[in-house]
Amino acid sequence: MTLRLGDVAPNFTAETSEGKIDFYEYLGDGWGILFSHPADYTPVCTTELGTVAKLKNEFAKRNTKVMALSVDGLESHKGWISDINETQQTEVNFPIIADEDRKIANLYDMIHPNSNENFTVRSVFVIGSDKKIKLIITYPASTGRNFDELLRVIDSLQLTANYSVATPANWKHGEDVVIAPAIKTEDIPGKFPKGHKVIKPYLRTTPQPDL
Ligand code: BEZ
């Protein structure tokens, strides 16, 4: 199944390291990240899952719940979680799906056979509170993900969901944003009272409106 931005993220129930979970129930009314990794007991994945565990408060601030997936089984996950906790000095605090039959990996198109027939690639899906897919990123097995970048994108997605703005290249929370082209220049002061700059008629900036 090919999933694209704007599609509804398919629901599923899965056996996870925290018991059987219905994905939609787990997400509730908040945002979610579903991310796959190639296999348990591998070095890059160990650092990734440790990093995500340490970012728990950052995800919570953004009302975002995290769920990981690999095609290894529950017993394997349990032993590996001990290793992650030990080596990354943290406690894994989110569920890891044991997708041995690849039901969810196939549902989310996480196996790319020309890369590897047997394992999931490093897929990331960010899912909005409306259960629609807001971001899809795919990394190869050999490259660990940058989870600070994921937090940055969630900041952008949540901001632009509520205001008629977009975020420019390399934008970070707190920096100026660009005003959506649909807003007429004469309407800007009413909508963005903190001020604005017109650099070109199509390139107008304003301070981040929700601060
Ligand atoms: C890793 O997570 O370390 C890894 C997994 C598959 C291939 C290469 C590295």
Image (cartoon, helix red, strand yellow):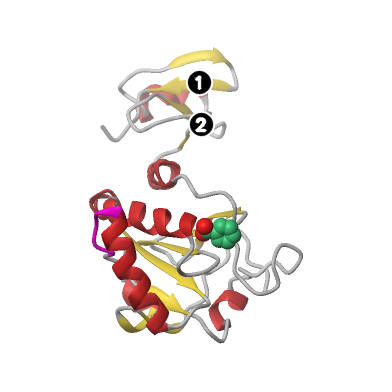
The mark found on residue 183 in the picture is: 2
The mark found on residue 204 in the picture is: 1
Point out residue 44 in the picture as x, y percentages from the top left corner. 48, 54
Query: Residue at 61% across / 71% down in the picture?
Result: 119
Q: Quadrant of the N terminus?
A: bottom right
- In the orientation shown, which residue stands out farthest toward the right? 114
Point out residue 136 in the picture as x, y percentages from the top left corner. 56, 56
Q: Which residues are magenta?
A: 88-92
Direction from residue 128 to residue 63 in the image, left or right: left
Q: Is residue 91 magenta?
A: yes
Label 1: state its secondary structure: strand
- Give whichever of discs 1 and 2 has the lower sequence position: 2
Closer to the camera in the image, 124 or 101: 101
- Quadrant field for ligand 1: bottom right
Label 2: state its secondary structure: loop
Q: Amino acid at mark 1?
A: Arg
Closer to the camera in the image, 98 or 56: 98
